Image (cartoon, grey):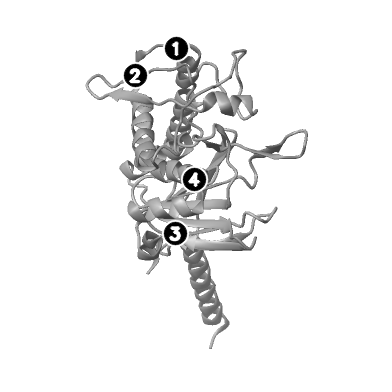
């Protein structure tokens, strides 16, 4: 065998090896874009290339919803509504859609989900008051006029959309990506998540945070092996709380029946929805507010996939699942 032939064989072999390496690299590559919004972080991960125009569109969606739903921006649509009471007023299409979904969850949750607790959230230090008096003495709700897509309310109580806005933004990003033929993606805004399609031919895996751990530690893992789309939301007080001067825990989730921070056996609630991150976000808050027994009752009644981590009567941490949860993962 000549030296020339041998060198050609070596070169061919090296070329094949490089091609295999390049193929495997591309087959496992993920494109990630990320940033900060809504007082938290966001990211979009996809095995498909996310071009610059898509990056800008995603950022615009996030910013647009912030200027609709943020309680921290005085110029947002919801802040202007809160600060300038009118019984009847027209609202944007985005805000109308958010209010419509919130209203349906309010009904299904038997009133445990109420987005008109903004004054209480503000008085507890979870939102600014913009120099206004945040005293709230009673519970109230609102109505929507479908004909002209307008809002009707009967009290000066403030809206707080923090329990639904992130889920709505995640859903809007998913709809944009899907319309752009970017069907495989994982979207995460502050723990409100959508998994769609596949991760280079494999299902996406999402770990659910252990509420008793101060580091990122999962209690269970969710994947979409049997579902092309899943929206996942987790609500809990394990990180977003304050302590009063006596050391008592003040939570950001409010019980509408007591108009005060929740005090129940739940450590965290995870809700999975097969269609909408907006609904999963709102349901997770509603179930967190009502306690384990009531939450599982309503989840089973309405076929909502739910996992609840709670302290049982013996002060032992336990996990309970709704019937729909098992249907998703059989």
Give neighbour class at mark 4: few <14, some 14-19, many 20+ (Cα, 10 Å): many
Rendering coords of residue 126 (x, y %): 62, 30
In the image shown, does 194 or 218 lie closer to the viewer?
Answer: 218
Say which element carries label 1: loop
> Is residue 330 visible to us here?
yes
Mark 2 vs 1: CB contact within 8 A: no
Direction bottom: furthest residue: 1
Tag 3 or tag 4, which sits nearer the N-term? 3
Mark 2 vs 4: CB contact within 8 A: no
In the image shown, does 17 or 110 lie closer to the viewer?
Answer: 110
Q: Which residue is identified by label 4?
A: 290
Q: Is 208 above or below relative to 282?
A: below
Q: Which residue is identified by label 1?
A: 85
Give neighbour class at mark 1: few <14, some 14-19, many 20+ (Cα, 10 Å): some
Tag 1 or tag 2, which sits nearer the N-term? 1
Rendering coords of residue 250 (x, y %): 66, 37
Say which element carries label 2: strand
Tag 4 or tag 2, which sits nearer the N-term? 2
Tag 1 or tag 3, which sits nearer the N-term? 1
Q: Which residue is identified by label 2?
A: 152
Tag 3 or tag 2, which sits nearer the N-term? 2
């Amino acid at each position: 065998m000549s030296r020339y032939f041998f060198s050609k064989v070596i070169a061919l072999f090296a070329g094949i090896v490089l091609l295999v390496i390049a193929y495997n690299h591309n087959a496992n590559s993920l494109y990630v874009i990320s940033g900060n919004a809504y007082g938290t972080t966001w990211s979009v991960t996809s095995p498909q290339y996310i071009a610059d125009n898509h990056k800008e569109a995603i950022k615009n969606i996030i910013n647009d919803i912030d200027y609709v739903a943020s309680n921290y921006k005085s110029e947002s649509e919801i802040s202007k509504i809160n600060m300038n009471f009118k019984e009847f007023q027209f609202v944007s299409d985005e805000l109308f859609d958010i209010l419509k979904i919130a209203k349906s969850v309010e009904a299904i949750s038997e009133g445990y989900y109420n987005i008109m607790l903004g004054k209480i959230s503000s008085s507890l230090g979870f939102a600014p008051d913009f120099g206004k008096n945040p005293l709230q003495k009673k519970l109230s709700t609102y109505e929507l006029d479908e004909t002209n897509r307008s809002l009707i309310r009967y009290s000066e109580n403030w809206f707080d959309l923090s329990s639904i806005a992130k889920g709505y933004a995640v859903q809007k990003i998913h709809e944009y990506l899907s319309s752009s033929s970017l069907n495989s993606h994982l979207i995460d805004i502050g723990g409100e998540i959508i998994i769609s399609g596949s991760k280079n031919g494999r299902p996406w895996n999402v770990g659910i945070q252990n509420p008793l751990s101060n580091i990122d530690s999962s209690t269970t893992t969710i994947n979409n092996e049997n579902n092309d789309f899943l929206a996942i939301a987790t609500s809990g007080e394990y990180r977003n709380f304050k302590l009063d001067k006596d050391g008592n825990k003040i939570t950001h989730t409010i019980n509408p029946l007591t108009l005060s921070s929740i005090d129940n056996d739940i450590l965290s609630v995870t809700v999975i929805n097969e269609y909408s991150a907006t609904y999963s976000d709102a349901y997770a808050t509603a179930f967190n507010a009502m306690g384990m027994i009531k939450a599982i009752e309503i989840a089973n009644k309405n076929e909502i996939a739910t996992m609840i981590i709670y302290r049982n009567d013996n002060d032992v941490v336990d996990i309970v699942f709704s019937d729909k949860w098992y249907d998703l993962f059989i």
